[in-house]
Image (cartoon, grey):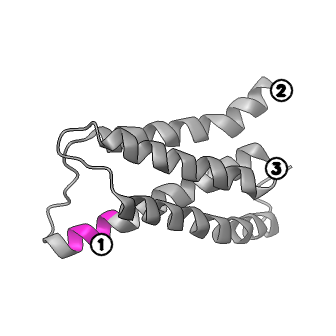
Amino acid sequence: MLKKFIKLWLPVLIWAIFIFYLSSLPNLSSGLNKTWDTILRKIAHMAEYAILFMLLTRAWQKPWKYSLIISICYALSDEFHQSFVPGRVMGLADICFDTAGVFIGQLLYPILVDNLKKNDKINVS
């Protein structure tokens, strides 16, 4: 029971800590020009939250709506956290990109699980 709990929830915890850590950094510039840097950061926002959603859905093993709500609430709290980091701001656009990532994760999760089941690489139950 404990092994299963750790197997399912440890990745969620590690990923949430990773997101929190990235939000704690005062400057996350890629070094690219402003346009490409912005595009890269917005894609990163969506990817972070797509992965968070999928990890939560895998761990929760319940309908995806729980993962959806928790992921979006985490995005809101993460943006609030950034408002206290020097050089960072709380941005509505970032919350929208995070939320878009959650919905992308919702679309991708069943596809990934089906493909992994077909290849017999995962036991989802």
Q: Are marks 1 and 3 in contact (CB under 8 Å)?
A: no
Residue pictured at 80% horizontal, 61% vertical: 120
Q: Which residue is mark 2?
A: 1
Q: CA distance from mark 2 to mark 3?
A: 17 Å
Badge 2 amino acid = Met
Q: Residues within 10 Å of mark 3 (few under 14, many from 20)?
A: few
Q: Which residue is mark 3?
A: 62
Q: In the rendered structure, which segment of residues is drawn in magenta?
A: 36-41
From the image, state whether disc 2 or disc 3 is nearer to you. Answer: 3
Q: Quadrant of the N terminus?
A: top right
Q: Which residue is mark 1?
A: 39
Task: Judge whether residue 121 can be spotted in this image.
Answer: yes
Residue extending farthest bottom:
35
Badge 3 amino acid = Lys
Q: Percent x, y for residue 49?
A: 51, 56
Residue pictured at 61% horizontal, 34% vertical: 10
Q: Are marks 2 and 3 in contact (CB under 8 Å)?
A: no
Q: Percent x, y for residue 79?
A: 39, 47
Kindly indicate the quadrant of the structure image that contains residue 31. Answer: bottom left
Q: CA distance from mark 1 to mark 2?
A: 42 Å
Residue 83 forms part of the magenta stretch: no
